[in-house]
Image: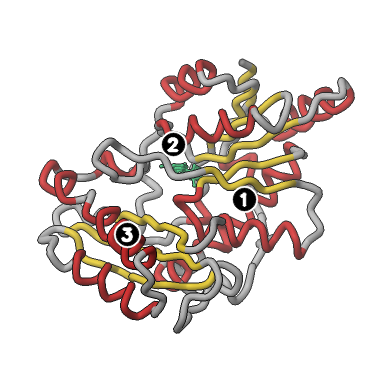
Amino acid sequence: MKIIHSCAEMRGYSLAARRAGLSLGLVPTMGALHDGHLSLLKTAARHCDNTVMSIFVNPTQFGPQEDFDRYPRRIERDSELAEAAGCGCLFAPSVEDMYPEGYDTYVNVENITDALCGANRTGHFRGVATVVLKLLNIVSPDIAVFGAKDAQQVIVVRRMVRDLHLPVLIIAAPTVREPDGLAMSSRNSYLSSNERAEAPIIYKALTEAQKLYNSGENIAESIKNRIVSILAQSRLLKPEYVEIVDTVRVKPIGKIKVPVLAAAACRTTETGTRLIDNIVLGGSL
Ligand code: AMP
């Protein structure tokens, strides 16, 4: 596996791959890799000849009070895991290369970023859209794979790609979970053992919502109430939001007629860790 740190070298690698007639995939990550990330490499391999995984803890998507400084960084272990999972090239640029002195350009995807994580993390999706556009420009992949765990991110990236006519196909890959249902996340390592024991309640609540929907309930408020009431049983997880939104406008709906996202974010009380999860009712992303 090739390891590249500079944006210029990454461009050269992509150009050479393209000239050799190889299709390229991109899997953007912030590292501290787990099986969720590695599953994206497997998905990418089904759609392209060679996959680039980027590892970049992107400062512009973190708020001033957020965990940028302490976000886990494990590049050596990550490169072993990525290589073993079939990654062709690891792209790990520096902050200085991505955001040089005097950097002034950002991408704002409007409206659909007003809800869910966008409402609770000011500027988060501006940072995400900006870094994803930059990575797409540097790597020029044919496809890019994102995890359904960050469903709003998938919707935002797809909207940016459509609105800006970017020549790339965005693929959403299913959420990979721990055996007890907790969605894998690099932030799970922040959890205290008590919090870790309670954390699967988020997926349990979403699964109950799915059951309610499958039994014929189509009033979003009823489904939301079920999720809220299950989360209320937790001592150490406090909901930041629970929402049922459509997957196009990302707006709350009354009656479920189209695929909807049932999404929840919780904050833990001991370590202040933020956990998110979601399921799609009546369709897929
Ligand atoms: P991150 O490193 O957290 O920015 O995530 C990088 C990519 O991996 C994003 O597209 C995430 O949606 C995806 N991802 C993170 N956790 C999971 C998971 N448990 N299952 C599937 N994809 C995931």
On the image, the x and y values in percent for residue 125 come to 54, 62
The secondary structure type at the circle numbered 3 is helix
**Left or right, 140 with reference to 77:** right
Residue 244 picture location, percent across and down? 42, 72
The CA distance from mark 2 to mark 3 is 19 Å
Tell me, for residue 131, which label it has, or none.
1
Q: Quadrant of residue 248?
A: bottom right
Check residue 36 in the rendering and tell me which mark sits there, or answer none. 2
Mark closer to the chain start, 2 or 3: 2
Q: Which mark is residue 175?
A: none
At label 2, which amino acid type do we have?
A: Gly
**202 lies above or below 183:** below
SS class of the residue under badge 1?
A: helix
Query: Please, what is the three-letter code of the amino acid marked with disc 1?
Result: Val
The N terminus, quarter of image: top right
Counting residues from the start of the chain, the first of labels 1 and 3 encountered is 1
The residue positioned 20% from the left and 64% from the top of the image is 231
Q: Mark 2 and ligand 1: say if the CB distance to the nearest ligand atom is below 8 Å.
A: yes
Q: Identify the residue position indicated by label 3 in the image.
A: 206
The residues tagged by marks 1 and 3 sit, at their Cα atoms, a distance apart of 30 Å
Which quadrant of the structure image shows residue 184?
top left
- Image quarter where the C terminus lies is bottom right
- Seen in the picture, residue 272 relative to 221 is either above or below; the reply is above
Q: Amino acid at mark 3?
A: Leu
